[in-house]
Amino acid sequence: MATPNPLEPVKGAGTTLWVYNGKGDAYANPLSDDDW
């Protein structure tokens, strides 16, 4: 299970890490909305 990133902007409850669709690398660029 992913650990929430405290530096990541909040996009809404349950929408950032929990509904991550795997099309991009969230850990490579957690501040970018690309491929999310």
Image (cartoon, rainbow, N blue to C red):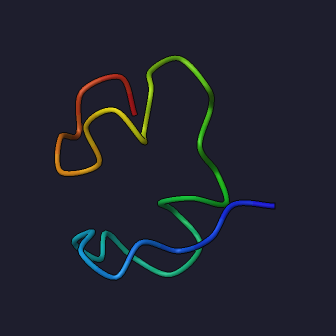
Q: Is residue 18 above or below residue 19?
A: below
Q: Is residue 2 above or below residue 25?
A: below
Q: Residue at x 34, y 82 (%)?
A: 6
Q: Residue furthest right?
A: 1
Q: Give the x, y percent position of residue 14.
A: 59, 73
Q: Is residue 26 above or below residue 3?
A: above
Q: Is residue 13 above or below residue 19?
A: below
Res. 1 image quadrant: bottom right
Q: Residue at x 44, y 21 (%)?
A: 24
* Count of numbered tags: 0
Q: Residue furthest top?
A: 23
Q: Residue at x 62, y 70 (%)?
A: 3
Q: Residue furthest front?
A: 28
Q: Give the x, y percent position of residue 30.
A: 29, 48
Residue sitting nearer the eye, 12 or 28? 28
Res. 22 image quadrant: top right
